Amino acid sequence: MHLLIDSTGSKVEGEGEWHARKHGGAKRRVWRKIHLGIDEKTLEIRAVEITGSHIGDAPVRPDLLDQIPEDQEIGSVTADGAYDTRKCHDAIADRGAHAVIPPRRNTKPWKVITAGAMARNEALRAARYLGRALW
């Protein structure tokens, strides 16, 4: 399975929003982030996590991978640069998968300690050699 991971936001509108629009006054906006893991082949949602807007993308990645059964083989995990963190790369490497995550601009190689860091440093070398347009 090739897993595609990303997130999107959803505005939650309650009585306070409606009341402010009708009668004027300050608006209170509440956002929720929906983090999805989708099977590339079937487009089936395999993992989902809903958080507050204050939670970033990267901390949710291990939770998404935990929702996929251990006996289900993951070939690769594709995500955007927001997931270029040690925890994300390590969680992907622990599942035996290949991370397809573009390194952030002006990033430095990590000191090689884990399999995730080694794979990420290889991706960084490839991006420097081939250019970022490849991502």
Image (cartoon, grey):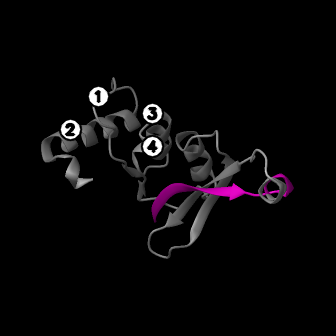
- Report which residue position mark 2 lands on: 125
State the residue lying farthest toward the front: 24
- Report which residue position mark 4 lands on: 82
Q: Secondary structure at mark 2?
A: helix
Rounded to the nearest angstrom, the CA distance separating label 2 from label 1 is 9 Å
- Report which residue position mark 1 lands on: 109
Q: Position of residue 66 (x, y in %)?
A: 62, 50
Q: Residue at x 45, y 43 (%)?
A: 82
Mark 4 or mark 2, which is nearer the start of the sequence?
Answer: 4
Mark 2 or mark 3, which is nearer the start of the sequence?
Answer: 3
Rounded to the nearest angstrom, the CA distance separating label 3 from label 1 is 11 Å
In the foreground, 96 or 50? 50
Rounded to the nearest angstrom, the CA distance separating label 3 from label 2 is 17 Å
Q: Nearer the viewer, mark 4 or mark 3?
A: 4
Q: Quadrant of residue 120?
A: top left
Q: Which residues are magenta?
A: 1-17
